[in-house]
Image: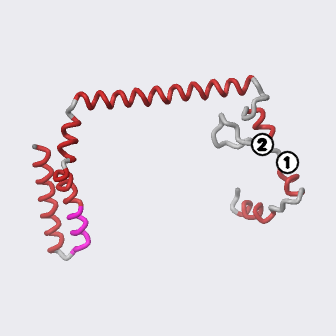
């Protein structure tokens, strides 16, 4: 009940400020202030404020929030542990496709490095250009921009 009263008073005050602003011939600003002022009134009329107030002071709702947080912690922890186990297994057995050594040999991004490409030697990049792929115009643009 108190939250609804406060929201209604804020809406009335905002509409009053919008009226004064419109009197000063600043119509665009007045319309924007009126739009902001009508938001709390709309929330009261839809019942969202009452639901939020009831939820914020409910121990059952906070228990649910705590359980959701615990669930998120468990998901992220198990995923991190699984990723570490896969990385350790990939380091031990280089024959696994997707391991770091297989990725280095093919020049792909290794799964444990997330977005950091493995550096190649200059000979492999110039050899590809000499093999029929002409990227000289692309290289010139990149050099022009300092990349």
Query: Horizontally, is 65 left or right of 96 in the view?
Result: left
| Residue in view at x 17 percent, y 51 percent | 44
Check the image and report above or below for 144 versus 61: below
From the image, tell me which residue sits under label 1: 124
Query: Horizontally, is 16 left or right of 51 in the view?
Result: left
| Residue in view at x 71 percent, y 27 percent | 90
* Residue 95 x %, y %: 79, 29
Label 1 to label 2, Cα distance in Å?
10 Å
Q: Secondary structure at mark 1?
A: helix
Query: Horizontally, is 90 left or right of 62 in the view?
Result: right
Closer to the observer: label 1 or label 2? 2
Q: Which residues are magenta?
A: 26-35
* Residue 82 x %, y %: 59, 26
Q: Residues within 10 Å of mark 2 (few under 14, many from 20)?
A: some
Task: Kindly identify which numbered label has been placed on residue 85.
Answer: none
* Residue 2 x %, y %: 10, 43
Query: Horizontally, is 31 left or right of 124 in the view?
Result: left
User: In the image as oriented, which residue stretches furthest toward the front?
Assistant: 46
The quadrant holding residue 10 is: bottom left
Nearest the eye: 84 or 45 = 45
Task: Kindly identify which numbered label has been placed on residue 107.
Answer: 2
Check the image and report above or below for 1 versus 137: above
Quarter of the image where the N terminus is located:
top left
Instruction: Give the main secondary structure, helix, strand or loop, of the magenta stretch.
Output: helix
Q: Earlier in the sequence, mark 1 or mark 2?
A: 2
The quadrant holding residue 131 is: bottom right
Q: Residues within 10 Å of mark 1 (few under 14, many from 20)?
A: few
Residues at badges 1 and 2 in contact (C-beta under 8 Å)?
Answer: yes
Q: Is residue 33 magenta?
A: yes
| Residue in view at x 23 percent, y 28 percent | 59
* Residue 24 x %, y %: 17, 74
User: In the image as oriented, which residue stretches furthest toward the bottom?
Assistant: 25
């Amino acid at each position: 009940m108190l939250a609804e009263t406060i929201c209604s008073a804020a809406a009335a005050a905002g509409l009053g400020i919008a009226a004064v602003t419109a009197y000063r011939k600043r119509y665009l600003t007045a319309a924007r202030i009126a739009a902001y002022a009508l938001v709390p009134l709309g929330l009261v009329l839809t019942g969202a404020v009452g639901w939020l107030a009831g939820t914020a002071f409910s121990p059952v709702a906070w228990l649910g929030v705590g359980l959701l947080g615990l669930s998120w912690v468990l998901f992220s922890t198990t995923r991190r542990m699984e990723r570490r186990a896969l990385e350790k297994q990939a380091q031990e057995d280089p024959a696994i496709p997707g391991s770091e050594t297989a990725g280095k040999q093919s020049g792909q991004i290794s799964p444990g490095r997330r977005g950091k490409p493995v550096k190649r030697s200059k000979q492999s990049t110039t050899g590809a250009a000499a093999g029929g792929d002409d990227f000289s115009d692309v290289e010139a643009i990149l050099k022009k921009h300092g990349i």
